[in-house]
Amino acid sequence: MPRKTKQPTPPIEREGSPWTGLWAVVTKEMADHMTSARMRILEILIVLTAAGSVYSAMQQLRETVGQDPYLFLKLFTTSKDPLPSFINFLIFLVPLIAIALAFDSINAEFSRRTLSRVLAQPIYRDALLMGKFLGAFFTLSLVLTVIWLLIFGLGIVGLGLPPSTEEVARSLWFLLTTIFYGGIWLAVAVVFSIVFRQPATAALASIAVWLFFTVFWGILASLFAQTISPVQYGTMDEIIRQTETQIALSRISPNTLYAESMIAILQPTVRSTGFLLPVQLEGAVMGSPLPLRQSLLLIWPQFTGLIAVTILLFALGYVLFQRQEIRA
């Protein structure tokens, strides 16, 4: 009798949308983040940082500032030795918090050998990756919102007056911009979590990218600007061209985009985030604040750049994750 050959098992056809199970993954990830020891350490660090910087800012404001229509906004930008301003703290803290939330989002499933079991459920790869990113993103948003409320509460108690409508609106845009700044580093950590199977390697790679843009990119942007637009005769046009080239190159860094956005939002008197000649200020009342709408138009390229980089990095991680082979 002829020997029967075993027919291959047909693939399981799943019903429903590719996003089935998305919110279940989001809820599970947020619960894991909020109850982890890692998050408790970060919360203590954040509370101490916010309280210390705001306290030093209030001490400085009591000594130097009298009547100011944007007194609450100065809580974010005022510093007093030895503590820097709260914005300078955020430039360092937000990437570290984002990386800590997402550096092991995918490779931890490989290490625990649970990824194939999760995908055996009615959950697609699309929903799993999006759920893990959104879980970390919502957790980061919640943490930053709590910090924002803490600063406002301390400001009301310490300064003894409520914020104006303009100050609340500007601080809300500050919060939204900070969240998307953190979203970039979340996406970076997720990409490295997909590329590297070891969580420690993914964490080190993410921190290395952050250190590169924080410490070294400004130096490299200056060197590249001198090469691309050299100053040969010392004319004003050559100096302006080189300065504009250096500013454009420095804006490749998310830190620069975020810093420029914060300066324009929290300091309404700022009229430009780039190189500005005195002749371009003719007719402008020096020291007069810009309306919120004008400040938003000023930082709109930086704000959309933060969102675009977050989307592009997540799309890169999505493509890499879809091409990975997952075995039981």
Image (cartoon, rainbow, N blue to C red):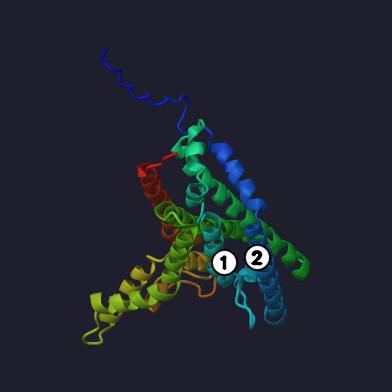
Question: What is the residue that sits farthest to the top in this orientation?
Answer: 1
Callout 2: SS: helix
| 242 relative to 265 in the view: left or right | left
Going by the numbered disc 1, the residue's amino acid type is Leu
Residue at 68 percent across and 82 percent down: it is 64
What residue is shown at x 75% (from left), y 70% (from top)?
159
Picture coordinates of residue 113, whole percent (x, y): 50, 45
Q: Is residue 69 above or below residue 7?
A: below
Q: Which mark is residue 93?
A: 1
**Residue 56's x, y, as percent?**
69, 77
Of the residues under marks 2 and 1, which one precedes in the sequence? 2
Residue 313 lies left or right of residue 105; in this view the side is: left
Residue under pointer 2: 46
Q: How far apart in space, not on screen, are marks 2 and 1 (Cα)? A: 8 Å
Q: Residue 125: x and y, percent?
A: 44, 38
Q: Is residue 256 left or right of residue 138?
A: left
Local packing at callout 1 (Cα closer than 10 Å; few below 14, some 14-19, many 20+) is some
28 up-or-down from 94: above or below: above
Relative depth, front residue between 283 and 155: 155
Identity, as a three-letter code, of the amino acid under mark 2: Ile
User: Mark 2 touching mark 1, by CB under 8 A?
Assistant: yes
